[in-house]
Amino acid sequence: MLFTAAAYPIFSRPIYAIWKKACGNIKVEPDNRHRAQLRLINSFLTSHHYQNAILNDAKSKEILTNYLAYLDFGKYLFTHHDIQRFRQYNNVLDDFIRKGDLSVPFQLYNEFIEKRSEQIAWSLKRLEKPFSDNARGELQLDREKVDWAKSDRELQERWEKRLLNEWIALRLAKRSDEKARSILKKRYSNMTKRINQPKADEIFQLFANAITSVYDPHTTYFSPRTGESFDISMSLSLEGIGAQLSMEEELITIKELITGGPAQKSGKLSANDHILGVAQGISGAMEDVVGWRLDEAVNLIRGKRGTIVRLQIQKASNDEITEITLVRDKIKLEDSAAQSKIKTITHNDKSYRIGIIELPSFYIDFDAYHRGDKNYRSTTRDVKKLLTELQKQGIDGLLIDLRENGGGSLAEAVDLTGLFIDKGPVVQVRRADGDLTIHKDNDGKTFYDGPLAVLINENSASASEIFA
């Protein structure tokens, strides 16, 4: 990407003071439950993680490094001086964690909000002036290779390059300079709403994962909202309108309509339409969601089966704004479920029918299982049905495709393995205290005993590795 080292505005502290006054003095504090959870996480990891490691000064330094990377991975906000100042906490975070003291991570997050506000104010001022189509320069896209800025002036140079990069992307999309800057102005203005809506749960989740990542890259803490999304992905179902949403140009945008869902059946929604407002029921007030956090808007749109939601939509085709009414229903996320097909290959002048089962994840509907629902959804149940159909159609061999399958339910990995062996151990789990649990298949039955191959790649992990 090429730009010029053209003149850009030197940031004025009075301007930022006016912006900060308009935004309000945003400061977020941890809840008491977060302090208790922090102590619990430390106790659990120390006692039960396989490494059986106690937090010390070395790990404290690593936790701080991880957390700062979460806050400012692109190195657009903090200077080298800021980082050196934060290094005073290198050897004390382990002590703070044991006490359940979250003052440091929340202090750093509040500084992040202030720096982000400053960047937004500078960017909006810069967008008042046009960019040159003949701009030249360089932007390092791999931000891990970038050092922390040595001064505020260098930060502003980075803001200029980032803003220009975003402007170029819009110009390449055939937007005029004026239109591109208008879009960016709206984008950065709406960022104000987002930084004004910090959630203590999410800040705690960031810091908790900065801790868990020093043990291993696969141990993760879920906030309640993240846990809900995980349960949805594991059960392959949700109750809502049947649309995948994303945030584009600070607008909530329909990325894809799920086949069979209320949104698709209505015939009134299309990919790339923008959702401007959400209302509940026939007469509920329309709530504007432009500039909202995506997860909060999604929470408004989701709801129980049979309930009504009204959406204010800006059509992608002609920018027309209209209101539609949908009745929520249960949506099946089939793209994440096991699927099968038959492929014919020829070898030594002989044709072979190979059954292929593609498995994106190891899933199970935990809620339905615990309710005693006899029709609960799971990987093993779905694969068994698919395998039955493949055998009816006649196959000479079977390929289980686990490429890009990052894992999921351990129990499903064991149960799925049991379809292909009569009995025996599948995997053993050793705890930090030395206790060993062997997970076995004990039914004495083999559902499929024909030729079998398992296909994996570098992204096949966890339950996939166990099965393979």
Image: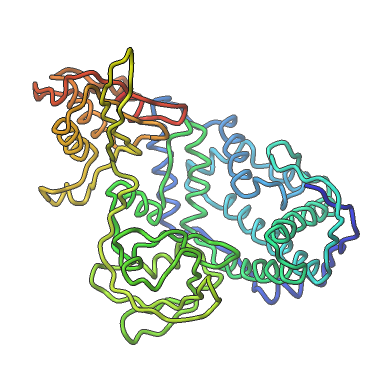
Q: Nearer the viewer, residue 52 or 70?
A: 70
Can you give x and y, in whole percent of width and height, for residue 440 in the image?
18, 23
Q: Residue furthest front?
A: 349
Can you give x and y, in whole percent of width and height, for residue 313 in the image?
47, 76
Q: At 23% across and 33% down in the image, what residue appears?
A: 411
Q: Is residue 450 above or below residue 167?
A: above
Q: Residue furthest bottom?
A: 283
Q: How is the image coloured?
A: rainbow
Q: Residue furthest top?
A: 348
Q: At 45% across and 31% down in the image, what residue appears?
A: 459
Can you give x and y, in whole percent of width and height, for residue 303 in the image?
31, 68
Can you give x and y, in whole percent of width and height, for residue 77 in the image?
72, 53
Q: Nearer the viewer, residue 82 or 300?
A: 300
Quarter of the view holding residue 241: bottom left
Query: For the image shown, how many numbered marks are present on the structure?
Result: 0
Is residue 171 shown left or right of residue 420? right
Is residue 199 shown left or right of residue 283? right
Is residue 198 shown left or right of residue 357? right
Q: At 24% across and 38% down in the image, what residue appears?
A: 379
Q: At 77% across and 57% down in the image, what residue appears?
A: 164
Q: Quadrant of the C terminus?
A: top left
Q: Nearer the viewer, residue 105 or 157?
A: 157
Quarter of the view holding residue 190: bottom right
Q: Nearer the viewer, residue 65 or 136?
A: 136
Q: Is residue 318 above or below residue 76?
A: below
